[in-house]
Image (cartoon, helix red, strand yellow):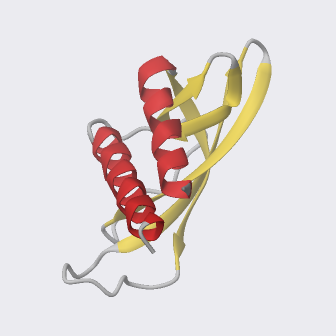
Amino acid sequence: MLFVLYAAFLGTLLLFGEEKQATLTSYRQEYGERNEVIPNRYTYLFGYKFTVEGKTYHGTGQRVASPVFLKPTAESTISIRYLPCCPYLNSHVEGKETWKSSLIFLGIGVGLLLFFRKM
């Protein structure tokens, strides 16, 4: 059920959310190299903040990338989407990857719901 809810959240952000540039507040590597087929890939956690109508909101995210990255400066930004009615509901956006993620989560959620419904 959580996969379906998260997919609905991402879909709502993509359809009704507004895009904005947020300032990176932190960016760090989590643990060591990922145990995957593709070598030299790491998980990075980041924090960001943005302002809507004079009020500051914060968010976090993660991404998988190569071991080479630049430390964020005070001017480093990232694209995010937020709901205008409640800006605290926000997420970082990486182009077409977000649509793919939303569809994958929806498919996994529906598949699991159907599987456990028959049990």
Q: Which image quarter is the N terminus in? A: bottom right
Q: Residue furthest left?
A: 37
Q: Residue at x 46, y 64 (%)?
A: 117
In the image, is residue 1 above or below residue 21? below
Q: Residue furthest front?
A: 118
Relative to 55, is 96 on the left or the right?
Answer: left
Closer to the camera, 2 or 13? 2
Q: Can you give x and y, in whole percent of width and height, for residue 30 in the image?
A: 53, 75
Closer to the camera, 118 or 47? 118
In the image, is residue 62 above or below residue 34? above
Q: Can you give x and y, in whole percent of width and height, for residue 63 in the image?
A: 42, 59
Q: Is residue 4 visible?
A: yes
Relative to 1, is 11 on the left or the right?
Answer: left
Q: Residue at x 60, y 23 (%)?
A: 83
The quarter of the displayed image where residue 115 is located? bottom left
Q: Can you give x and y, in whole percent of width and height, for residue 99 in the image?
A: 31, 38
In the image, is residue 10 above or below residue 111? above
Q: Residue furthest top?
A: 53
Q: Is residue 76 visible?
A: no
In the image, is residue 17 above or below residue 97? above
Q: Which image quarter is the C terminus in? A: bottom left
Q: Residue at x 45, y 60 (%)?
A: 113
Q: Can you give x and y, in whole percent of width and height, for residue 66 in the image?
A: 30, 68
